[in-house]
Amino acid sequence: MKQGNMSDKEEGANEFDPFAEVDVLGSGNLIKKTITQGDESKERASTGMEVNINVLSVKVDDKHVEYSIDGTNDVSNGGYVTFIVGDNDVCHAWELVVPLLHPGEKCRIRSRRQFDGSVKMEEDSWIEYVVEVEHVKSRKPIHKLELKERIAQGNQKRARGNFLFKQEQWDLAATSFHRGIKYATSTEGSSEMEVLCGTLWNNLAQVQLKCSKWNDALESCENTIRLDKKNIKAYYRKAKALQAKKEYELAIECVQTACNFENDNKTPLKKLLAVLKNQQRQSSQEKTELYKRMAAGIQSKSSSQPKDTKSLSSLLGLIQNPYSWVLALIASCILIVSILSSAISKREEL
């Protein structure tokens, strides 16, 4: 009996408690606790599947707060949210926990700020969500979706990206815009799709400028201009990227091109153009001064050295001044041609 009782205790200790708190990542920063079990006979969500959840409450440090996915509607008190797992439509906390839930399951999710950058809170604060999974369903691949659905998803990613940009979540905003571009890129020739795709590329360029990714920003601006040749914002942002790379002449050309388009407010363009011209002038002056100092240094070294070291000085001067190499090469070519011509003429005389 005693041994039997021990076995019962051990068996009970090993039983899984579905209502116990689960440390999702093992770091103590993301906790899941089931309130009501779901239907385990139904499929849970995985990457690429569509999920609809009911957000019953959102609290930060036990205080109710308003909560929005894209900055428009508050969903913190019974709001429904539909998103695609893996598309960056919602916070990381939901992306990680919701795929663990069966349809009908209600749970409490507690996380640190690192899993939800869309809410302003302290580093050591907790945000708590109570959500319930309504349904889960599979989706077609992007290329098989109807045009209308692709435009809708592209606009959803655009709105989410704009919201994250305002929250200064640059990387997350870029992810949303990149994802939106995948939906909005089409060969069907839809003007609405082209406008949306151009907007997404342009917004992505703005994020890349914030992250000092100048070459990526240039590429995004070029993609925007390819879709909309008179997009003034794209030319302006392209000029800003070129300015950061100190390619002032090309940046000035961009701004001047944009100024030729009809626009009610050209003040930002004119201001940038004035700054670029001033920077170009300063850059030119700095280069001139540098060349003068280099030439003066070479001349000073040459005159101060003994005669027997002047040949070495001349060689060093050639190494330091690339233009001298060009002149020396031209002179050598002329000398060689002259010697060959002389040799040929002498041979003919013989």
Image: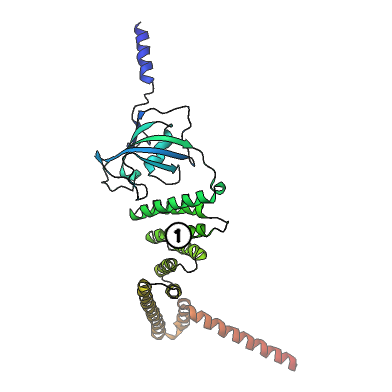
Q: From the image, which quarter does the C terminus lie in? A: bottom right
Q: Quadrant of residue 33?
A: top left
Residue 221: where, in percent of width, then height?
46, 64
* SS assignment at label 1: helix
**Residue situated in front as seen by the camera: 110 or 329:** 110
Horizontally, residue 118 falls left or right of residue 313, namely: left
Q: Which residue is mark 1?
A: 199
Q: Residues within 10 Å of mark 1 (few under 14, many from 20)?
A: many
Does the image show residue 74? yes
Residue farthest along the bottom direction in this orientation: 349
Does the image show residue 126? no
Give, as a three-letter code, the residue at label 1: Thr
**Residue situated in front as seen by the camera: 94 or 327:** 94
**Residue situated in front as seen by the camera: 296 or 88:** 88
The coloring applied to the image is rainbow
Residue 162: where, in percent of width, then height?
38, 55
Q: From the image, which quarter does the N terminus lie in? A: top left
Residue 319: where, in percent of width, then height?
47, 76
Q: Is residue 282 above or below residue 245?
A: below
Q: Is residue 28 above or below residue 223?
A: above
Residue 239: where, in percent of width, then height?
42, 69
Which residue corresponds to the image point at 39% horizontal and 23% vertical from the top-left? Answer: 16
Q: Is residue 111 above or below residue 271?
A: above
Q: Quadrant of residue 233?
A: bottom left
Q: How many marks?
A: 1
